[in-house]
């Protein structure tokens, strides 16, 4: 597995997912905004829907579905790695000095749960009765949970040239990216195949970029959304690394309105086949600027690129990169249906093969329109999964696809 992919729709061979766990039960009506959620899902039902999703992938594609928790536990048997992650996770509460004592009192599997689901002071006191937590209340988090972790698309992105490890915009999600990077750089199945494009070596506080903003357009082009979660400086550095690596010849910076419904580029459109795109029309019309990065010269280790602001629509750009382009609008073009289904990520379907997608069952008008175009639509239940405001693409990180 070389951890590079050259399309959004090649037949899926391997994918990374995370089954929601105790971190979801940490959400309350009072802390959900702090934890970057807009609702409080019912965990048991959420898990059943997620299991249906992962089982559907296995049954219909034969792809290998890796679960993050299993990979994480394998890596955490290295006590040096576990200690560093635990120390880093405790920094915000000022309890980093407790890391070694925690490792001595909790098993590796329990530590994996702590790193994803968090740890409260009163829970820690059960293991360490003499704990002096200072001014922290018993209900406070020693380590905050990661309820967004089931959206595996955001913490990293695979491209034709290598891996972009995300620098998450919101501090509360940065540990997700740290966990994934630790797994891929240390797990025996993956570590020899990691070619890191971002962050640049030596950048301790890199500008923010998130995986949901990275879309492969063609063999030679990648689009990256300049969104409320991805910064221009990060796009520049990622483009420079991609172009310098040599596989990709063009990187487009797509300027999105800084609005919740356009959080990432993959909420605007997804590529379903070599000539088919599913798009949210309001968002496509709202994109007012696109920039193009190309390679200027390579002189030894020094890479120079140039940036050109394009005076043309995103649709024109897509048409140039995708010959004979056909664009299908969410909600089958009906404005009311489109807005309603976009709230539940109608454009954010997951392609498991050419013209073969997994979509939420609630987006009936979009799914019907896809089928009318000959797309095979595999539906999953979505009453709880959709509460996180992310679609099937958001929940999956493809690790291997057939080359197209």
Image: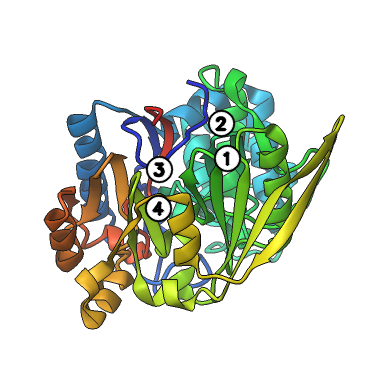
Disc 2 target residue: 183
Q: Earlier in the sequence, mark 1 or mark 3?
A: 3
Residue beneath the point at 59% across and 36% down:
163
Q: Earlier in the sequence, mark 4 or mark 1?
A: 1
- Residue drawn at (21%, 63%) of the image: 383
Estimate how packed mark 2 is, as few (under 14), some (14 to 19) or many (20 or more) residues with alpha carbons within 10 Å. Answer: many
Q: CA distance from mark 2 to mark 3?
A: 23 Å
Which of the image's four quarters has the C terminus?
top left
**Residue occupied by mark 4:** 394
Of 301 and 129, nearer the camera is 301
Residue on which disc 3 sits? 8
In percent of the image, x 81 and y 40: which residue is there? Answer: 297
The residue indicated by pointer 1 is: 179
Q: Residue 148: x and y, percent?
A: 45, 56
Q: Position of residue 28 (x, y in %)?
A: 40, 69
From the viewer's perspective, tell me whether residue 401 is left or right of residue 78: left
* C-alpha distance separating marks 4 and 1: 17 Å
Q: Is residue 126 visible?
A: yes
Q: Are marks 1 and 2 in contact (CB under 8 Å)?
A: yes
- Looking at the image, residue 172 lies above or below residue 105: below
126 or 86: nearer the viewer: 86
Q: Is residue 99 visible?
A: no
């Amino acid at each position: 597995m070389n951890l590079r992919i050259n399309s959004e729709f090649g037949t899926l061979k391997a994918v990374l997912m995370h089954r929601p766990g105790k971190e979801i039960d940490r959400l309350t009506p009072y802390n959900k905004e702090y934890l970057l959620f807009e609702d409080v899902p019912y965990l048991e039902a959420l898990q059943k829907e997620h299991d249906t999703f992962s089982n559907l992938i296995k049954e219909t594609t034969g792809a290998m579905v890796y679960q993050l928790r299993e990979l994480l536990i394998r890596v955490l048997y290295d006590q040096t790695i576990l200690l560093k992650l635990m120390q880093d996770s405790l920094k915000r509460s000022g309890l980093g000095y407790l890391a070694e004592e925690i490792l001595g009192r909790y098993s590796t599997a329990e530590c994996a749960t702590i790193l994803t689901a968090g740890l409260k002071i009163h829970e820690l006191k059960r293991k360490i009765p003499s704990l002096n937590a200072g001014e922290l209340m018993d209900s406070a988090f020693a380590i905050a949970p990661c309820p967004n972790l089931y959206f595996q698309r955001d913490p990293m992105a695979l491209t034709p040239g290598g891996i972009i490890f995300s620098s998450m915009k919101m501090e509360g999600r940065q540990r997700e990216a740290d966990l994934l990077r630790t797994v891929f750089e240390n797990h025996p199945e993956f570590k020899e195949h990691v070619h890191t494009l971002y962050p640049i070596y030596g950048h301790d506080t890199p500008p923010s970029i998130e995986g949901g903003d990275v879309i492969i357009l063609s063999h030679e082009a990648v689009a990256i959304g300049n969104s409320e979660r991805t910064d221009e400086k990060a796009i520049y550095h990622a483009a420079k690394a991609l172009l310098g690596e040599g596989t990709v010849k063009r990187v487009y910076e797509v300027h999105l309105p800084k609005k919740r419904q356009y959080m990432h580029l993959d909420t605007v459109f997804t590529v379903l086949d070599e000539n088919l795109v599913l798009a949210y029309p309001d968002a496509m019309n709202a994109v007012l600027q696109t920039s193009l990065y190309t390679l200027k010269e390579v002189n030894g280790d020094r890479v120079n690129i140039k940036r050109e602001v394009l005076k043309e629509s995103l649709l024109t750009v897509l048409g140039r990169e995708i010959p004979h382009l056909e664009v299908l609008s969410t909600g089958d073009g009906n404005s009311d249906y489109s807005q309603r289904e976009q709230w539940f990520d109608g454009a954010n379907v997951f392609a498991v093969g050419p013209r073969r997608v997994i979509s939420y069952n609630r987006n009936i008008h979009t799914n019907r329109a896809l089928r009318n175009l000959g797309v095979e639509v595999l539906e999953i239940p979505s009453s709880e999964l959709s509460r996180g405001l992310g679609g099937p693409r958001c929940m999956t990180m493809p690790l291997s696809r057939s080359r197209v």
